[in-house]
Image (tube, rainbow, N blue to C red):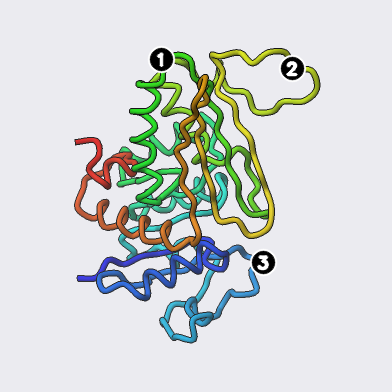
Amino acid sequence: MSLRVAISGCSGRMGRMLIEAVVGSADCQLHGALARPDSPTLGQDASAFLGKNSGVLVTADLHQALSGADVLIDFTRPEGTLAHLTVCRELGVNAVIGTTGFDAQQKALIGAHAGHIGIMMAPNMSVGVNVVLRLLNLAARSLNEGYDIEIIEAHHRHKVDAPSGTALQMGEVVAKALGRDLKACAVYGREGVTGERDPSTIGFATVRGGDIVGDHTVLFAGTGERIEISHKSSSRVTYAQGSLRAARFLASHPAGLYDMNDVLGLNA
């Protein structure tokens, strides 16, 4: 039986990539396509941009898109995602969340929903990025003295949050491995006479421009050497395929809050 997938933000760049991945999958079927009430795509076939007819019309009606679905894949905005989760919980629909920019209170609400449905939430669905996070844990524990740590990320001009959720997750992994609190040691910008660098800090630098899909580098700069661990995305297809992998994972697991480590078996 095919996994019935609903996609929110279906008319955006990531939404279209997800639709293409679902339509091209052997074990998934497009079940619902959500867009904003002001979207010009409302009422159109969700896969029309591919020159195909899926039989699924784009709608702004949450219940219409989610009724009968097995899972929602959501890459939108925090407020929209939380509204979608409320209906997912009501209808018993699992959720894969790639949205970033949640605050602590919003994350707590997601945790509460996860007591009733399966939720896989990660700031980056790329398999490669999640392997890099494991490498960063090892590097940080090994390079815990004498190395300054900087995180540099670059994304397209349309991205609205900074630093990226992936960059922040990288910082959290490194800080935890070093026994530090990222909130206390992060530096998000430097300007003017800043004084000598505090070796206990973790710096972040953000680049926004063009159509950059997503580049992340963590720099460990020591005396006489530097180590750089990087991941560069050339296409959103890696996020789409990772999202489908997460959706399949939720289909065989009970309600709860999961991350990509769970999906990839890295927590075992």
Q: Nearer the viewer, mark 3 or mark 1?
A: 1
**Horizontal and vertical percent position of residue 161:** 63, 43
Q: Which residue has dot 3 on it?
A: 38
- Amino acid marked by disc 3: Asp
Callout 3: helix, strand or loop? loop
Residue at the front extreme of this rendering: 224
Contact (CB < 8 A) between labels 2 and 1?
no
Q: Nearer the viewer, mark 2 or mark 1?
A: 2
Q: Residues within 10 Å of mark 1 (few under 14, many from 20)?
A: few
**Horizontal and vertical percent position of residue 36:** 60, 63
Q: Quadrant of the C terminus?
A: top left
Callout 1: helix, strand or loop? loop
Q: Name the one closer to the observer, 261 or 81.
A: 261
Would you say 251 lies left or right of 193 here?
Answer: left
**Horizontal and vertical percent position of residue 149:** 52, 25
Which picture quadrant has residue 69?
Answer: bottom left
Residue sitting at 40 percent across and 62 percent down?
66
Q: Residues within 10 Å of mark 2 (few under 14, many from 20)?
A: few
Q: Which residue has dot 2 on it?
A: 194
Answer with mark 3 or mark 2, whichever residue precedes in sequence.
3
Contact (CB < 8 A) between labels 3 and 2?
no
Residue sitting at 35 percent across and 50 percent down?
127
In whole angstroms, how far apart are the C-alphas of marks 3 and 1?
A: 47 Å
Give the numbered dot on residue 179. 1
Give the numbered dot on residue 4. none
Q: Is residue 91 above or below residue 45?
A: above
- Amino acid marked by disc 2: Thr
